[in-house]
Amino acid sequence: MLWRDRPGQVVAGAGANLPHYRKADRVVATEPDPAMRRRLAGRLDRATVLAVVREDRAESLSDPDDTFDAVLSTAVLCTVPDPDRALAEVARVLKPNGRLVVLEHVRGSGRLAEWQDRLDPVWTRIGAGCHANRDTRAAIERAGVTFELFEEFQPVPAWVPTSPMIEAVATRPS
């Protein structure tokens, strides 16, 4: 993916990140949704490195243990059916000292969290499976990786259901 000319695993969506991978030998992009895979295929020419697209689900990656130096997750953990299983798979396929890099929205606190819980059934339907109330930070911690960098920030008004966000790098212990 990004780190020191090594291969990486990416859950790709429509491929918005493809032009930004510059130091990887190769990117393995997984996208289980056929419509998103078609959009992704149309953007492969924007990739600056070799990009391979697969239809793996985040909860069942076809790669052997200890395969990747880095895994990037950008706004995906809110939509996977089982984030704990997906993050366990990430930890499995990361090499020792491999990095999980995330940019995700997370569960708010106080009144925002209460509103996220109330809105979640509707939000999930209109937001392509996005769960606004997922405690993604806790799920990452349960995966057994260690945060090296963690920043929570508010990119939009505090009342927006998909806020706050986190930018984080977590390492799989050796």
Image (cartoon, helix red, strand yellow):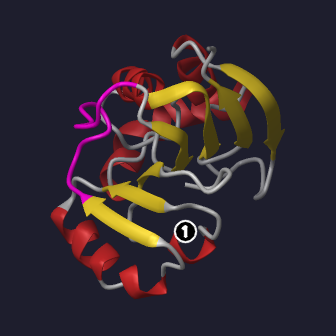
Position of 47 relative to 88 (above/below): below
Give the left or right position of residue 91, taking residue 51 as reference: right
Q: Looking at the image, which is closer to me, 112 or 51?
A: 51
Please report the residue visible at 58 percent of the width from the left and 35 percent of the height from the top. 115
Position of 16 relative to 163 (above/below): below
Please report the residue visible at 66 percent of the width from the left and 50 percent of the height from the top. 3
Magenta span: 54-65
Check if residue 18 falls in the magenta segment: no
In the picture of the structure, the residue carrying the numbered disc 1 is: 17
Q: Position of residue 163 (x, y in %)?
A: 67, 45
Give the left or right position of residue 125, taking residue 131 as reference: left
Please report the residue visible at 38 percent of the width from the left and 80 percent of the height from the top. 44
Position of 146 relative to 36 (above/below): above
Please report the residue visible at 20 percent of the width from the left and 54 percent of the height from the top. 55
10 Å crowding of disc 1: few (<14), some (14-19), many (20+): some
Q: Is residue 135 visible?
A: no
- On the rendered image, what quadrant is the N terminus found in? bottom right
Q: Position of residue 88 (x, y in %)?
A: 41, 20
Give the left or right position of residue 8, taking residue 109 as reference: left
